[in-house]
Image (cartoon, rainbow, N blue to C red):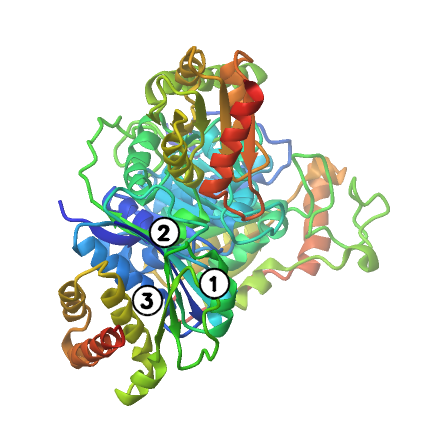
Amino acid sequence: MTTVYRKSAGLQDRELHYCPGCSHGIVHKLVAECMEELGLIDTAILVCPVGCSVFAGNYFACDCIEAIHGRAPAVATAVKRTHPDQLVVTYQGDGDLASIGAAEIVHAAMRGEKFTTVFINNAIYGMTGGQMAPTTLLGQRATTAPHGRIKELHGSPIRMAELLSTMDGLAYAERVCVADIPHLNKAKKAIKKAFEVQLSGAGFSFVEVLSACPTNWGMTPLEANKWLLENMAAYYPLGVIKEVPEA
Amino acid sequence: MEKELWKGNEAVAEAAIRAGCKCFFGYPITPQNEIPEYMSAHLPEAGGVFVQSESELAAINMVYGAAASGVRAMTSSSSPGISLKQEGISAMSSGELPGVVVNMMRGGPGLGTIQPSQCDYFQATRGGGNGDYRTIVLAPCDIQEAVDMTQEAFDLADIYRMPVMILGDGMIGQMMEPIVWHDIPKRELPPKDWCAGGRKGRDHSNFVTSLRIDAQDCEDFNRHLEAKYKTIAEKETRWAEKDAEGCEILIAAYGTPSRIALSAAEELEAKGIKAGLFRPQTVWPFPSKRLAELAAQDSVKAILVVEMSLGQMLEDVQLAVQGIKPVRFYGRVGGMVPSVEEIAEEAEKILQEVQ
Amino acid sequence: MKKQITIAGFGGQGVMSIGKSLVEAAVNEGLHATWVPSYGPEMRGGTANCEVVLSEEPVGSPVFTYPTELIAMNRPSLHKFEDKVKPGGIIFVNSSIIGDKVQRTDVKAVYVPCDTIADELGNKKVSNMVMLGAYIAATGALKEETIRQMLVHMFTGPKAKLVDLNMKALERGAACIG
């Protein structure tokens, strides 16, 4: 019998709680596979956020720390500074990273902290029930923007990869998406690259993953993936945003 | 052992390094700036990590991160900054993470003043952040005690897996006096087999979290904390007293006002009034039992609580004394410090009133 | 022996270091001592003061309402604290810049031209050491030798040449005490 697929050793044997069509499960898998392929499960420390992935520590096979809302980069700063030879990763959503934790992520990037952030941008607050995020697109409806996001009222969505790329401490930033297999493969490459940049000591590395939230977008999973490519990827350009020569 | 002259804030920082503190995270605020300044110069020399954080929120969460990965860590601030840190202190209590937090209190509310105060007693002793939790709160009255308590705080934090606060004030931080570096008795520390510092061969992963989404799980955890706090109250409650047995008036004070009250008690003695001093060294857990015993003495006519607040420890004293004796209060606030004369006059006045 | 000393002047006059020197010397002589500074923005220019307690017994209150001695390095300090000094106490006046006389008759007044002497020694910065010399000579609270040893300890390497200058300042201050 030949094995055609197996779950990554980077994940525990647990059923995920995520909704059908949610991108979290896919990104968990990619992160776990990258850790496994680099042989880092035994030493990696993952810092989890508040948001739908608040339980990520129940799924990953490496040691995990649950941070308070938005503070994962502060937590990871201390973990990496005290464990400089180990892989340290924060996994954060858009409310966590781009709203309540904006100061923490900006300053971690400014200091060039040598950890990696995987940023799940699905343009909505998931766990609390579909409220507007700083990354919600113009016109997109949310439970706290019932008429859609309005530029004059809410401002335009924030592009975190570009914003953080203005920091000298950031060594590598790429925006990817997980709407289909080709994009998913690119996403995995980006995550692995970010881990390698971290291990090289070049600086802070950042992967923004455009993700789907069918439940709060009010779509089927297939519709959500289509919307992701047509609308999200149109506002948030995919590709490498910044790469320093040392990376 | 030789006496050395130290400034309070610097002595506290040095004490932490001697206690094996490996990380310090802080944000500038008067009157505690000498702590991060000293740490920035000397902690890296001792092989530790210093980060000036972007905010007090970040600082306490860095302490959370270091503690979660098994490393001894500390932060310090003064009143407004300590308010910001409450989020992290609550999370550390829930994640059962050890850490040391220094509060060199200044007058409030709001930005208030940079002068010394004790206006954060409620915040320090009642948890301070969200949730039904406590932190061990050590209240030094001078630099020697601040140094000794800082060194002990790291062990207490590790033993009980919780944040420990050093509750000082601007005067303790800013003043200088001679101290002796004692060898603090080492306590037996439990292994940090719970920490998330990388598996490194462990057959399972560790997950440090403050979330217990299931209500029954969360209640069970709160009951666990309750039991832990009961043990701490039994084993770690500390106080000091002077001439408290057989006194007519018992002055209760902690921190800077307690040493001023000591001088006031001496003045009263000189006038033939038997004044005793009761000085909590832990304000949580509060030494209620001993205070009740002292209050119950036939000789005691009244208890005078002195604070640099509008009356916060006063409530703990009232709870301990249970109305069996009159409890009176004298406080100065907003950065003002009570004088020896004020305390002595107040004590005399109270004795006349209760007779 | 118990001294409660208020030392006050402009920021930059070395007011804080008079206090620190007293406390350090006291500790070297095995006495108990405390130093409490005024702190905050006023340290960068306005008035600065510190409270020092020297005692054979452990120090209770490090702050006090009534000093046994006042060292006034500038005019506002003399006016602010003159009334507080304990009867029988001493007020030290930096007479180079304070033209006023002490009004009270129940305290002793000592006039020391600190800045004038410091100028004569060629370094304005040692005016505070002149005052320290006067204080020690007038009160006998500490031994001159302790201060000398402290200076030797304080100024080492390229700064060692400052020991002599400071010693001269102390001696000139002491000489003002009749």
Q: Could you say which disc has been placed on residue B2 in the image?
A: none
Point out residue B54 in the picture as x, y percentages from the top left corner.
50, 56
Which residue occupies the foreground of this view, B153 or B331? B331
Point out residue C67 in the picture as x, y percentages from the top left corner.
40, 55
Chain under callout 1: C
Which residue occupies the foreground of this view, A100 or B122? B122
**Residue that mark 2 sits on:** B9
Q: CA distance from mark 1 to mark 2?
A: 32 Å
Question: Could you tell me the amino acid type at mark 3?
Answer: Ser
Q: CA distance from mark 3 to mark 1?
A: 21 Å
Residue drawn where x is 34% and y is 23% of the image: B236
Label 1 residue SS: helix
CB under 8 Å between discs 2 and 3: no
**Residue that mark 3 sits on:** C17
Point out residue C135 in the picture as x, y percentages from the top left corner.
28, 66
B214 displayed left or right of C53: right
- Which of the two marks, 1 or 2, is nearer to us in this view? 1
Point out residue A185 in the picture as x, y percentages from the top left corner.
50, 50
Q: CA distance from mark 2 to mark 3?
A: 18 Å
B47 displayed left or right of C84: left
Which residue occupies the foreground of this view, B325 or A58? B325
Q: Eyeballing the image, is B270 above or below A199?
A: above
**Residue that mark 1 sits on:** C82
Label 2 residue SS: helix
